[in-house]
Amino acid sequence: MQNFPILSDQPDVDSWEEQRAFDPTIRARTEGGYTRTRPRTTRIPMQWKVRYKFISSADKSVIQAFENAVRVGADAFAWTNPADGSNRTVRFREPVKYALESNGQLWRAEMVLEEV
């Protein structure tokens, strides 16, 4: 299993998002107006939205090469959560989004990681 690459910049903490990957609850309404619930799964994986602001073209190329190596969401990889330092096994939930910043030389990268 590959490790997420080390970049020259840290993720933007102002735009950090962390949540459950999905709601595992199955809900069923009864004729009496009650709702019965039960979990669909025994485990609820986490999901993180990570944004890097103002990364260089070199860092962008590193992320793109890594994304190709893990075939976007096909392969899992090791990632260290910068918020708490925990090691997680994750995969890309969707392709990484890139946007050119206003100065035209730096990039913003946004990725959604889902725990395996």
Image (cartoon, rainbow, N blue to C red):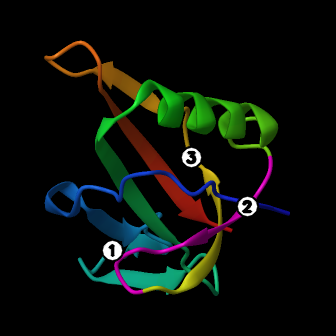
Q: Is residue 26 above or below residue 3?
A: below
Q: Which residue is mark 3?
A: 93
Q: Residue at x 60, y 68 (%)?
A: 79
Judged from the image, the secondary structure of the residue bearing numbered disc 3 is loop
Q: Earlier in the sequence, mark 3 or mark 1?
A: 1
Q: Which residues are magenta?
A: 75-84
Q: Which label is found at residue 77?
A: 2
Q: Quadrant of residue 61?
A: top right
Q: Secondary structure at mark 2?
A: strand
Q: Label 1: which residue?
A: 31
Q: Residue furthest top?
A: 104
Closest to the observer, 1 or 8:
8
Quadrant of residue 53 within the rendered picture: top left
Residue type (three-letter) at the residue carrying disc 2: Phe
Q: Considering the image in quadrants, where does the C terminus appear?
A: bottom right
Residue 95 relative to residue 3: left or right: left
* Position of residue 18 measured from the top left corner of the image (x, y, whole percent): 33, 68
Specify the amino acid type for callout 1: Glu
* Left or right of residue 102: residue 109: right
Q: Earlier in the sequence, mark 3 or mark 2?
A: 2
